[in-house]
Image (spheres, rainbow, N blue to C red):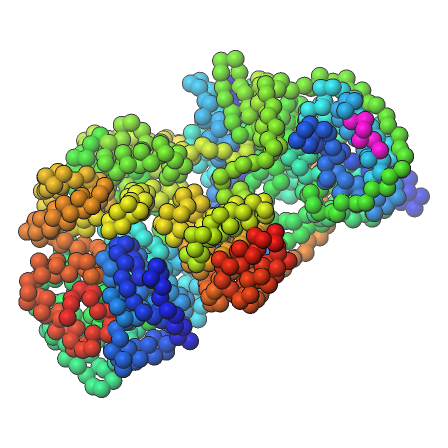
């Protein structure tokens, strides 16, 4: 049944993690795909746009409505089947399942009672000795799978496993005319840059944008476009503007036992250098995350106020910066450490100056520690909201190829200091994508930060990187499309939108405006 | 001086599911170091001085050696596994007896013996007191703080309605309740070193215990029968448009 | 032949109960409720002799009539000033000595913190078995059948002790408080403790009530969510006080600045396991429900009949949270 409610002005459905409040009239809550179809058909008749939401954990206002109605997938939150194909096992999921739920489900072996989508899949998966898991791990684990697919989300493990797109086997999409499209990867491809999409009233020709989409670095700036693109990728990463995902198949990866490690270094430069050299030492971690001295000091300060903050031992005095990575926990672990030891020592660290843990609850502590840096900043900003209601978090989301990383780190330092801003750096250094989180103290800082941001975005593009590595465009970063692909790029995306959704009823305002 | 810490391997209770009958499915659930025992070990480590030795011991199947390895990684110095088919089915009495004999024969110079308050898999926390009686030494339960001065140890005990501070004699058994110590993590070096420390396995004969002193035969209680009790969330819906009636209904229900 | 004539069997008979003494805020000693509950149950089970043991000094004398009124026939008082305070080793020694003298079939005490410390030591001294934290007691001849939950709470195990005296600690609140029979008479025997097992107590502080700020310790939680107005906050505090609990909230209210983060329940806040979780205006997001999965009873008040919290609630009241909260405060 399609539940319909009025939206109060202070409703949580008008806001996402970017903390900017939108406005809208009705909240539509579908229980099933049929309800979504009904909602879209109604919108097509009335012309009232629908902003689609998952768990509203987006950072760019992708789920924030600017008028019209809101459609939330939160009630479509079941895992519905298990399958197996030549790549491996996959789960059939509804869009409202969160990543956390998915992996809890896998850990607790909830799939044992699910129907098999391909013959014998459930029995086969249940009888496997090794556990399996869904490897894309955005730090915000409470994001929905539908949202993750729509935004091609990434996390620390993208270092080893790639972004969400690489794990999507199939999507089922409701198009702007209410018809349903079921696409398995490999089933429908573009010819060059022309893709034919079947609608109820006949096939439509989509001309994919002509720009070069940078796949060398982590990149969520704009929709994917490439020669002979798979139709699934029209919907994966396009932020909900071409269709509403009502079901998806995601592949699973074997879960090996892991050991989490944090290695301390005397200073930031030592850590960058180590991260750069890690690639060549013959050890492949699951991910490689970085904490700069600013973020470690932030943790130290938070712990003074609340000793229970982060369930970890006190940070030792010699910890200037730190690198966090998981290794495969197996009989050859001492060999892996033996390869790392000289590299660590060469950059001022030592195997003594580290933490490690392999029991699940210890690994969760490491993970929570990593999450505590953005968490502290979030709480800090939330407290400031009282006095400065317009304030929001300001973090960079820029990636560069690894060989230009040093230059980029120098650029961050120079530009931000020049604008008088305080910042901490942490995150996916393995992907050339550290988060630079600007610690805003008041509205003046916000103004400076926006200026600095634009400067840095231009610098990043010049270095061959992307100014939106992970967070996407949404409504806040539409400028980047112009910055990266020019007016032509913007026009190209707009043309695709006009073909797929001529009435602009699906999540208008995301990525491109009318 | 020597500390002895008695630990236990338990299933990870956060991952345990319940089947249709309401009983727990233990199979396939990973085993971990009991958190209360871990805290007891942390307590000992916090007061350890150079020259002290921390000995950990557990009674369990061969697999329990993993837990001892974990204790060594966290900082224990030596580890003993009391494992024997004959120990199976031991109740509190037999367990305490086995541990007491271990302490007397293999750690006779032990000063403080620490245990977790109870184990996370439902044990009832009786072993520390029985162990103390069998060793004929004083016991200190519900310890929330252990401090050490040159003159000796002091504990703070929390009985709920009384907080008591006592001096601890040279030899005693402590049962440690939850506390505020942030659990430590081994460094990579410590982890690697701990893999090389040998774990000694002792059976009934090594402990020189008779067959009627251990396990099921050495127990003083036996389970006669079990039954399941069903509890379900009822989810009863009540109309609350009239606040006064609704409040009355709530009061009934509470 | 031994069986038929019941020869070579223990002469153990009667039940010995450790009577735990608590103190009212002004320092007057009184009999703990759990001890009364046990005596009530013992009287119900059979008509064999009932012994009691208490430790202390002259301050205990006014309690004798009450103790007899609950059915104790012979009261052993271990008369020792130093035993006014709990001394587990000395208590256990004395208790064991008395047990050897009177040979009871069973020794019972409450599963209070002190009882749970005393019982195992005593059991070890008497080389007998102990069943802790029982929720049921039955008797078959002189054999005690003790019931207690096995791990997980959904399984009940019935246990027997294989030696005399059979020992058990009983969970407080398992049995009802019995009605006393004033005017019953009994005998007091003073027992002298000659041991030296004294604790070196540096300090002892009475804790009257745990004025904690820790919602994880609260037995009752009044939880507020986005569906309530700010004016309901003091009302909620009042209701919580009356119910002997605390107020907690969902993430939204922390974001609004109405509560500190320490009051937040949920995935990124705290996990709580109260006996009662009263949710007002909480829709029950996945993150929030994760934090209350172990609550024993969940009652939800919300205008939305389909709020997610309904999936885990025992009682769902569909109505205006603010208004109902106000009315509830009036009638409590």
Q: Is residue B235 left or right of residue A396?
A: right
Residue C221 picture location, percent across and down: 53, 49
Q: Which residues are magenta?
A: C60-65
Residue B171's quadrant in the figure?
Answer: top right
Front-lying residue, A434 or B112: A434
Residue A11 picture location, percent across and down: 35, 61
Whether residue C257 is situated above or below residue A91 in the rendered picture:
above
The residue positioned 55% from the left and 24% from the top of the image is B155
The residue positioned 71% from the left and 23% from the top of the image is C84
Whether residue C24 is situated above or below residue A134 in the rendered picture:
above
Front-lying residue, B216 or A469: A469
Magenta stretch contains residue C61: yes
The residue positioned 68% from the left and 43% from the top of the image is C171
Q: Is residue B198 left or right of residue B22?
A: left
Farthest residue toward the top?
B151
Whether residue B183 is situated above or below residue C308 in the rendered picture:
above
């Amino acid at each position: 049944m399609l539940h319909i409610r009025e939206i109060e002005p202070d409703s949580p459905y008008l806001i996402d993690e970017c903390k900017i409040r939108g406005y809208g009239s009705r909240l539509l809550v579908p229980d099933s795909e049929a309800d979504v179809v009904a909602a879209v058909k109604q919108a097509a008749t009335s012309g009232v746009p629908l902003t689609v939401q998952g768990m509203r954990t987006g950072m760019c206002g992708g789920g924030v409505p600017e008028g019209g109605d809101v459609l939330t997938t939160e009630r479509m939150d079941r895992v519905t089947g298990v399958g197996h194909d030549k790549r491996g096992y996959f789960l059939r999921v509804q869009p409202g399942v969160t990543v956390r739920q998915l992996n809890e489900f896998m850990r607790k072996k909830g799939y044992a009672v699910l129907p098999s989508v391909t013959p014998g899949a459930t029995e086969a998966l249940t009888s496997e000795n090794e556990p399996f898991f869904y490897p894309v791990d955005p730090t915000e684990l409470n994001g929905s799978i539908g949202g993750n697919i729509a935004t091609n989300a990434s996390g620390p493990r993208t270092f080893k496993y790639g972004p969400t797109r690489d794990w999507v086997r199939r999507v089922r999409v409701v198009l702007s005319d209410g018809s349903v499209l079921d696409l398995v990867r490999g089933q429908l491809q573009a010819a060059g840059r022309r893709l034919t999409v079947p609608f109820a009233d006949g096939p439509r020709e989509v001309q994919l944008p002509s720009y070069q989409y940078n796949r060398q670095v982590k990149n969520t700036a704009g929709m994917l476009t490439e020669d002979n693109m798979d139709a699934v990728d029209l919907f994966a990463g396009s932020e909900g503007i071409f269709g509403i995902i009502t079901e998806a198949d995601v592949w699973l990866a074997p879960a090996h036992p892991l050991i989490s490690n944090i290695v301390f270094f005397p200073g930031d430069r030592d850590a960058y250098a180590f991260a750069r050299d890690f690639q060549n030492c013959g050890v492949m971690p699951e991910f490689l995350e970085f904490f700069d001295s600013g973020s470690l000091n932030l943790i130290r300060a938070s712990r003074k106020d609340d000793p229970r903050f982060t369930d970890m031992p006190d940070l030792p005095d010699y910890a200037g910066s730190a690198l966090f990575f998981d290794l495969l926990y197996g009989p050859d672990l001492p060999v892996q450490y033996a390869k790392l030891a000289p590299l660590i020592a060469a950059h001022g660290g030592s195997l003594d100056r580290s933490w490690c843990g392999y029991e699940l609850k210890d690994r969760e502590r490491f993970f929570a520690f990593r999450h505590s840096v953005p968490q502290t900043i979030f709480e800090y900003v939330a407290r400031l909201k009282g006095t400065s209601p317009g304030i929001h978090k300001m973090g960079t989301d820029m990636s560069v190829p690894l060989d230009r990383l040093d230059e980029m780190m120098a650029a961050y330092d120079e530009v931000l200091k020049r604008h008088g801003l305080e910042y901490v750096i942490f995150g996916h250094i393995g992907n050339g994508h550290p988060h630079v989180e600007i610690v805003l103290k008041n509205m003046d800082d916000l103004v400076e930060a926006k200026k600095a941001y634009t400067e840095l975005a231009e610098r990043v593009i010049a270095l061959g990187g992307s100014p939106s590595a992970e967070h996407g465009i949404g409504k806040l970063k539409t400028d980047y499309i112009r910055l990266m692909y020019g007016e032509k790029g913007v026009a190209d995306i707009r043309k695709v939108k006009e073909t797929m959704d001529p009435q602009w009823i699906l999540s208008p305002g995301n990525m491109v405006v009318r | 001086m020597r500390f002895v810490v008695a630990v236990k391997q338990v299933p990870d209770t956060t991952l345990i599911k319940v089947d249709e009958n309401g009983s727990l499915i233990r199979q396939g659930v990973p085993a971990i170091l009991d958190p209360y025992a871990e805290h007891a070990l942390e307590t000992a480590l916090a007061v350890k001085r150079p020259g002290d030795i921390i000995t950990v011991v557990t009674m369990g199947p061969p697999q329990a050696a993993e837990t001892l390895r974990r204790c060594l990684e966290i900082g224990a110095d030596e580890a003993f596994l009391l494992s024997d088919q004959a120990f199976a089915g031991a109740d509190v009495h037999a367990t305490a007896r086995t541990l007491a004999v271990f302490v007397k024969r293999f750690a006779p110079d032990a000063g403080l013996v620490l245990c977790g308050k109870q184990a996370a898999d439902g044990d009832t926390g009786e072993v520390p007191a029985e162990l103390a009686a069998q060793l004929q030494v004083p016991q200190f339960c519900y310890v929330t703080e252990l401090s050490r001065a040159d003159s000796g140890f002091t504990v703070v005990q929390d009985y709920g309605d009384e907080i008591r501070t006592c001096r601890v004699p040279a030899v005693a058994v402590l049962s440690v309740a939850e506390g505020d110590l942030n659990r430590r993590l081994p460094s990579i070096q410590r982890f690697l070193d701990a893999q090389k420390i040998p774990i000694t396995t002792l059976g009934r004969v090594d402990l020189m215990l008779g067959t009627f002193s251990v396990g099921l035969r050495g127990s003083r209680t036996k389970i006669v029968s079990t039954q399941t009790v069903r509890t379900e969330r009822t989810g009863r819906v009540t109309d609350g448009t009239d606040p006064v009636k609704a409040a009355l209904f709530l009061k009934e229900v509470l | 032949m031994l069986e038929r004539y019941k020869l070579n069997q223990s002469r153990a008979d009667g039940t010995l109960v450790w009577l735990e003494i608590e103190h009212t805020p002004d320092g007057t000693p009184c009999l703990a409720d759990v001890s009364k509950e046990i005596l009530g149950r013992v009287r119900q089970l059979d008509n064999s002799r009932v012994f009691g043991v208490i430790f202390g000094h002259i301050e205990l004398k006014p309690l004798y009539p009450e103790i007899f009124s609950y059915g104790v026939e012979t009261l052993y008082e271990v008369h020792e000033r130093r035993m006014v305070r709990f001394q587990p080793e000395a208590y256990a020694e004395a208790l064991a000595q008395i047990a050897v003298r009177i040979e009871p079939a069973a020794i019972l005490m409450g599963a209070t913190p002190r009882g749970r410390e005393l019982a195992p030591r005593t059991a070890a001294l008497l080389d007998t078995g102990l069943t802790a934290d029982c929720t049921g007691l039955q008797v078959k001849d002189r054999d005690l059948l003790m019931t207690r939950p096995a791990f997980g709470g959904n399984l009940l195990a019935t246990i027997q002790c294989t030696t005399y005296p059979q020992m058990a600690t009983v969970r407080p609140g398992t049995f009802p408080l019995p009605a006393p029979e004033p005017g019953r008479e009994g005998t007091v025997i003073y027992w002298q403790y000659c041991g030296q097992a004294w604790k070196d107590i540096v300090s002892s502080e009475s804790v009257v009530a745990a004025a904690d700020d820790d919602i994880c310790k609260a037995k009752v939680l009044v939880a507020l969510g986005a569906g309530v107005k700010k004016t309901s906050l003091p009302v909620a505090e009042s209701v919580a006080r009356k119910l002997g609990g605390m107020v907690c909230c969902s993430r939204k209210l922390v974001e609004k600045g109405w509560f500190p983060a320490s009051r937040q329940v949920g995935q990124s806040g705290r996990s709580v396991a109260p006996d009662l979780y009263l949710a007002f205006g909480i829709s029950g997001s996945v993150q929030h429900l994760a934090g209350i999965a172990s609550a024993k009873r969940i009652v939800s008040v919300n205008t939305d009949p389909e709020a997610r919290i309904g999936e885990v609630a025992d009682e769902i009241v569909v109505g205006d949270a603010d208004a109902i909260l106000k009315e509830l405060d009036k009638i409590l």
